[in-house]
Amino acid sequence: MIKIFDYLGSLDCFVVTAQYKSLANTLGLTEWHEAVWIGRYFILDNDQGEHWFDNWELREKIEKQTNLLGIDPSDIFIVDPDRFKNGLDGPCHSDIERKQFWTDVLNSLHLSHAVLFAEARHLNEKRKFHDAECYIDDLEERIEKIKEGLENGFSSITQ
C-alpha cells in the first residue's frame, strides 16, 4: 500500500508523498498533478473530479508560508468543503464537518499497487489513441520492475 498524501497540519494542507510522486511519474499517472485521476473517483467518477483541488485562492493565502518551507504553492492541496457537496439533496453536514471528514480521509488514504497499476494501464490505453506523446511504450516492463522490487522487499521501485 502506498500513502498518497502527507498532511501539513501547521498549514492545513496536503502534499503528495515523495514515494507516490515518484511512482505516479514512473507509471504515467501524473497529468497536471499526481492526484487528478484520484479526484475523478472522489467526485462521482467524472471529469469534474479532476478539478477537486482547483482552489487557487486558498493556496494564495498560505503561499508565503509554503515558500518558506521550500514547497512550491502549486504542489499543495487544500480541502475546500464546498467542492465536496453538490446541493442536490443537502448538504447533510456543515462545512466544518465536511472539511474534517475529507481531511481525515485524505490523511489516511493508501492505495494498493494493484489499483495504481490498473489505473496506469487504463490511462495509457486511452493515451495510445488520444495522446500519443504521453503514451508509455514500456509500461508493462515498468510495472514488472516495480513488482520485482516489491517481491524483493522494497516498498516501491521506480525508474
Image (spheres, rainbow, N blue to C red):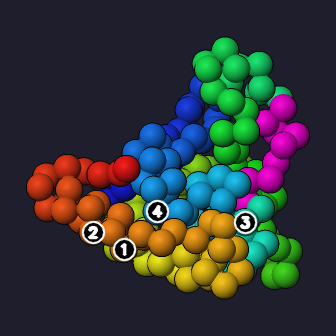
Crowd class of label 3 (few under 14; some 14 to 19; many from 20; radius 10 Å): many
Q: For the residues labelled 3 and 1, say whether their Cβ atoms are less than 8 Å apart.
A: no
Residue indicated by mark 3: 50
Is residue 137 in view from this perspective? yes
Name which of mark 2 and mark 4 comes first in the sequence.
Answer: 4
Residue 5 or residue 144, whichever sits in front: 144
Q: Which residue is mark 2?
A: 144
Residue 69 versus residue 130 in the image, above or below: above
Query: In whole angstroms, how far apart are the C-alphas of marks 2 and 4?
Result: 11 Å
Instruction: Of the two numbered discs 1 and 4 on the same chain, state the one appearing first in sequence.
Output: 4
State whether residue 28 is above or below residue 11: below
N-terminal of the pair, mark 3 or mark 1, is 3
Give the crowd class for mark 2: few <14, some 14-19, many >=20 residues within 10 Å. few
Q: List x then y, in percent, for residue 69.
A: 61, 19
* Tag 2 and tag 3, C-beta contact below 8 Å: no
Q: Which residue is at 53% across, 45% downward?
A: 16
Q: CA gap, disc 3 to disc 4? A: 18 Å
Whether residue 119 appears in this view of the structure is no
Q: Considering the numbered disc 1 on the image, is that residue within a helix, a strand or a loop? A: helix
The magenta region covers: 52-60
Identify the mark nearer the N-term, 2 or 3.
Answer: 3
Q: Position of residue 26 (x, y in %)?
A: 45, 56
Residue 117 belongs to the span the image colors magenta: no
Q: Residue type at mark 2: give it.
A: Glu
Label located before the other in sequence (3 or 4): 4
Q: Name the kind of residue labelled 3 in the image.
A: Glu
Which amino acid does the dot numbered 4 rest on?
Leu
Q: CA distance from mark 1 to mark 4?
A: 9 Å
Res. 27 mark: 4
The three-letter amino acid code for the residue at tag 1 is: Glu
